[in-house]
Image: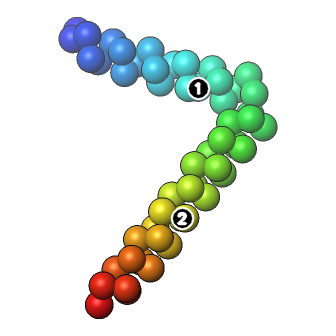
Amino acid sequence: MSVGKVVGILVAILVVFWIISSPTTAAHTVNNILADLASAGDSLITFLRGIV
């Protein structure tokens, strides 16, 4: 088994443990990430509209 595969499995296990141990914090984190992605998308659209 390669090192990358082992690291990936360990990261997945830690993420699942984090979600199970503190679901509220995990949900807030996901919501914040999605809000940041939406903001970045809006900024990109505004930039592209400004070019055209």
| Disc 1 element | helix
In the displayed structure image, the side of residue 42 where residue 17 appears, left or right = right
Percent across and percent down for residue 15 are 56, 26
Between the C-alphas of marks 2 and 1, the distance is 25 Å
Q: Which part of the image, by quadrant, shows the N terminus?
A: top left
Which quadrant of the figure has residue 25? top right
Percent across and percent down for residue 23 are 74, 34
- Tell me if residue 11 comes above or below residue 28 in the rendering: above
Label 2 is placed on what type of residue? Ala
Percent across and percent down for residue 42 are 50, 72
User: Which residue is farthest front?
Assistant: 50
Q: Residues within 10 Å of mark 1 (few under 14, many from 20)?
A: few
| Residue situated in front as seen by the camera: 43 or 12 | 43
Q: Residue at x 55, y 64 (%)?
A: 39
Q: Which part of the image, by quadrant, shows the C terminus?
A: bottom left
| Residue situated in front as seen by the camera: 50 or 17 | 50
The residue identified by callout 2 is 38
The residue identified by callout 1 is 16
Q: Residue at x 51, y 58 (%)?
A: 37
In the displayed structure image, the side of residue 28 where residue 40 appears, left or right = left
